[in-house]
Image (cartoon, grey):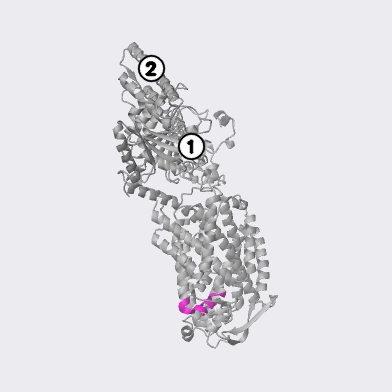
Amino acid sequence: MRSDEIESSDDNELPPRVGRRYDPVVAHDHDPVVLEMSSFDRGSSSSNNKVKTTIQPSKPAGAMEDSTPNDKEVNGEHTESKLELFGFDSLVNILGLKSMTGEPIPVPTSPRGPEDSSAAHHPTTSAVVKSGTMMGVFIPCLQNILGIIYYIRFSWIVGMAGIGGSLAVVALCGLCTFLTSISLSAIATNGAMKGGGPYYLIGRALGPEVGVSIGLCFFLGNAVAGSMYVLGAVETFLNAVPKAGLFRETITQVNGTTVAEPITTPSLHDLQVYGIIVTIILVFIVFGGVKMINKVAPAFLIPVLFSLLCIFIGMFAAGKDDPTVGVTGLSLKSFKDNWGSAYQTTNNAGIPDPNGEIYWHFNALVGLFFPAVTGIMAGSNRSSSLKDTQHSIPIGTLAATLTTTAMYFVSVFLFGSVATREKLFTDRLLTVTIAWPSSAIIYIGIILSTLGAALQSLTGAPRLLAAIANDDILPVLNYFKVADGNEPHIATFFTAFLCIACVVIGNLDLISPTITMFYLLCYAGVNLSCFLLDLLDAPSWRPRWKFHHWSLSLLGASLCIVIMFLISWSFTVVSLALASLIYYYVSIKGKAGDWGDGFKSAYFQLALRSLRSLGASNVHPKNWYPIPLIFCRPWGKLPENVPCHPKLADFANCMKKKGRGMSIFVDILDGDYQDCAEDAKTACKNLATYIEYKRCEGVAEIVVAPTMSDGFRGIVQTMGLGNLKPNIVVLRYPEIWRRENLTEIPATFVGIINDCIVANKAVVIVKGLDEWPNEYQRQYGTIDLYWIVRDGGLMLLLSQLLLTKEMFESCKIQVFCIAEEDSDAEELKADVRKFLYDLRMQAEVIVISMKTWDHTGGSGSGSNTQDDSVEAFSAAQKRIKNYLTEMKDRAQHEGKPLMADGKNVVVNDQQVEKFLYTTLKLNSTIMNYSRMAAVVLVSLPPPPVNHPSYFYMEYMDLLVENIPRLLIVRGYRKDVVTLFT
């Protein structure tokens, strides 16, 4: 808004903040913190007005919005005027202290970055009711933990396992959830939590693949748990109102004896019919919205607590003269009789039957009871509605866990002392029988608690699935995405379908172990997350909950896995296989997401430890790996949007054995770093995309420097860490330097070679890169090595690496050695053969005497080759002579000594002619012996001292003339191969 617009506007239309206005710059999405500071002065303001920067006391957001600009400007206050020096927005806005500014701060809703944010602004004046520890964490956890298992299965478990065995079952399950609660408390207090509950915690700690796989299993566990609660409510209702059943089954046999009264259990078909009807009704309630569910949630808890009170009062009030058969009251005799276990065979309804199909033992009872201790995640699922998550979640979760575990321990003693074992076996609703004053209270409590838990499952499971889908990791889950504030209707339909499918099974005892596996898998993920984060101890790991240790988390995770196998190894294998399949599918089809997970931190620390263990000493030849530095700067121009020569990555892959190793692709941008920083980031991203497209293991680096020579000199000195510095520099031979008349190439090319020699880097120069084959172009013939100087065995190693590639595996190696005298030829040949044999390399050795260079040799085409060579030799001599004459004339005209490339030049005509003759004859030899070779490798001659770079380029041109595919190799002062094992 311009100042003239402000002057003409009404006071009520002025913006809430004046004096200084800070507007974010809409720039590159990868630089979201750059902010532009714009200011304006009112026309009525005097130029000599002094600006105060006093800080006013904080006010409520509404009060700040109601204040007018005139209130601030009467006193000339511009509270943020001094921040212009820093060029950034105030810490008030950055940290989101809205009570001082009254401005909403955009908050991204996805951990992958601002681009995934779907929430625009959160109003600061909205009155959101926040819950404390009691109502926000403790009560929800208590309501979820106390469920159907305690009411209709706990007394039966005491009868089957005995008091001693039941105490062991409760202790094992309680210890598992207690250790998981500690791990949950540590992770939950290490930062803000968002939607998704344990999926969010595990995914951000172990990565998206593990998070999605365990999150989907946890979703299945919640959906199946909903069916368990529905079946529990229906079974309780049919026991309370037997006439409502459409079918009826009567069983009167217990351990071969007949009890006084018949034992009736609901029919499987009744459970299925009523279960489907109840599930459909609950789904319609869920579609009514989560607000209605939250309003009635406290009403479900009151009957539960009251029914528990009635149960305990009934157990204490029960006497020996109780008319109910089998209820002895709190009796020491019953305690002794029920101490030991009585594992036996039952039918599908849990009634003892010698001909039954199910044999119950300790492990099976653990699986049956474990759902009675689940629900510790209820508080973390409500993190967005808590006043202080880092205070409420640890205290509320642990308090609920300890309270319910203590209640279970007490209940074991009371149930084991109040009735005979036959009564514990046959009366699945013993809690109803002994309740005081009326059994109807227990029926109502059971039905309301189970229906409330089922309603919570049918409400939470779709939101968990929607949270996984909204993270946009698995494309197949896109159907379940929902916008913020909308209900996940499609996910609710899918959850209802799964719930009804489990209701059709109709057997609570078969469904319970399935839920146990999924919950244990989730708890193991939480423990492993805390274990990994605690063990790595990254700087960002600073949980407020201090009572944790990695050993406890490891013990909790191990206990979860042990319990899974104790319950059922088959269910465990199936659940782990399902999670593994989801993990594999996510890793293949999923989109990459960097959440700063613990595995990335583990890789980082492992890399640092490995780097330190390597040390700074020389690497042993047996452990030497090529780390090529691929110089992408082209000699000339590449097509638009092509960051590198298309064949450089193909050649880089040829320098690795079975793809193992790392390549560093570097490019240099000419210019000033501050001006070209953004261009460098874009170029680096394009280069990295190219590397990934070419399926080459490597990293991309872009350096900004005034010139190419300065940039490369910095790269060769600083690139890499310790022994992971690049050891080979790979660049393309500048074949276009004479054709394009690029006069700066010779000095740059020679400078790069000299820098590599000084930095002790090996050099591989590729001539004929356009002709280099790709992975689908199989080559035949030979790989010829012209081994002239000692290079540490690099040329031999490169030839062996080429043979490991499919394109060169049909080739054979020939090693050409140059002998100065004929008498040395045979001895040299024998030595080289023995050396290659000790190196486990198969190659044919050919020795060439330097005296044979005076003869044509070879085939009948030698005369033509010699004529071409003589012509090239004469042309090179003429160009060098002309270049030298121009230099001398220029130096004489300027009155300076003879100089080239910024240094003094000392020219020896005989030495120049000798160098030309040497390269000429070496080229002729290569053309005679290796005209049909797939690849030729030759030693790189170093640039002569005090010779102009132009001369060196003439030498090199004579060497590479007419050779289609040539690698010019120079090793360094280290051996890369060894004779010893």
Quarter of the N terminus within the rendering? top right
Corner quadrant of residue 914 = top left
Please name whichever residue, 238 or 123, is drawn nearer the observer in this view of the structure. Answer: 238
Q: What secondary structure is found at the residue carrying circle 2? A: helix
Residue furthest right in the image: 246
What amino acid is at disc 2? Answer: Tyr
Asked if the stretch drawn in magenta spans residue 153, the answer is yes
Relative to 809, is 502 above or below?
A: below
Give me the residue at 62% from left, 56% from top. 491
Characterize the magenta stretch by its predominant secondary structure. Answer: helix
Q: Position of residue 483 (x, y in %)?
A: 61, 49
Q: Position of residue 44 (x, y in %)?
A: 52, 28
Q: Position of residue 587 (x, y in %)?
A: 52, 51
Corner quadrant of residue 395 = bottom left
825 relative position to 398: left or right: left
Q: What residue does disc 2 label? A: 883
Asked if the stretch drawn in magenta spans residue 2, the answer is no
Give me the residue at 62% from left, 62% from top. 498
* Magenta residue span: 152-165
Of the two numbered discs 2 and 1 in the rendering, the one whose residue sits closer to the viewer? 2
Corner quadrant of residue 957 = top left
Q: Position of residue 330 (x, y in %)?
A: 49, 83
Q: What secondary structure is found at the residue carrying circle 1? A: helix
224 relative position to 853: left or right: right
What amino acid is at disc 1? Answer: Leu
Q: What residue does disc 1 label? A: 687
Going from N to C along the chain, the mark reached first, 2 or 1, is 1
